[in-house]
Image (cartoon, grey):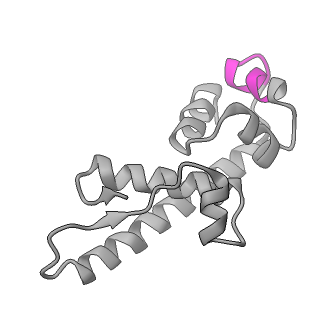
């Protein structure tokens, strides 16, 4: 994975540099910035974690698409929850963490952008 791919995926997953550094890389935000700038090579374990998140995101999208298709019979509007804060997300999903929350935001935005579902 190159530095531009790392940055693009971080942004796709709605992660701040600090969140990605802490929860994916286990490093300082400055180290993550060095990877994104191309100053240092993206470590293999970080690339693997990011690739794992790609597959996780696609799996969530597929599951949601299946549910939407199943429930859309006769329903005029489909809604997806979008939680503005981690604490709001944790209130509904007690076992959640930052990565889960950001992935939920990412998927909700995907469906909104695809005009498949609205956000509430």
At x 72% / y 72%, what residue is drawn? Answer: 95
Indicate the position of residue 70 as horizontal and vertical percent values: 26, 83
Q: What span is in magenta?
A: 32-40
Residue 52 visible in the current orientation:
no
Indicate the position of residue 68 as horizontal and vertical percent values: 29, 74
At x 79% / y 22%, what residue is drawn? Answer: 40
Residue 86 versus residue 6: which sits nearer the camera? 86
| Image vertical order of residue 40 relative to residue 113, above or below | above
At x 60% / y 61%, what residue is drawn? Answer: 89
At x 78% / y 38%, what residue is drawn? Answer: 21
Residue 44 versus residue 74: which sits nearer the camera? 74
Q: Residue furthest right?
A: 27
| SS assignment for the magenta stretch, majority | helix
Query: Which quadrant of the view contains residue 32?
Result: top right
Residue 109 visible in the current orientation:
yes
The tally of labels here is 0
Q: In which quadrant of the rendered image does the N terminus lie?
A: top right
């Amino acid at each position: 994975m190159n530095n531009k791919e790392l940055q693009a995926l971080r942004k796709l997953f709605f992660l701040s540099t600090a969140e990605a550094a802490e929860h994916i890389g286990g490093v300082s935000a400055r180290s993550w910035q060095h990877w994104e700038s191309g100053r240092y090579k993206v470590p293999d374990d970080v690339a693997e974690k990011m690739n794992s998140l790609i597959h996780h995101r696609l799996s969530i999208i597929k599951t949601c698409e299946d549910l939407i298709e199943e429930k859309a019979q006769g329903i005029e509007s489909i809604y997806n929850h979008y939680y503005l804060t981690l604490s709001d997300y944790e209130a509904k999903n007690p076992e959640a963490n930052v990565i889960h929350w950001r992935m939920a935001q990412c998927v909700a935005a995907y469906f909104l952008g695809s005009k498949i579902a609205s956000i509430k």
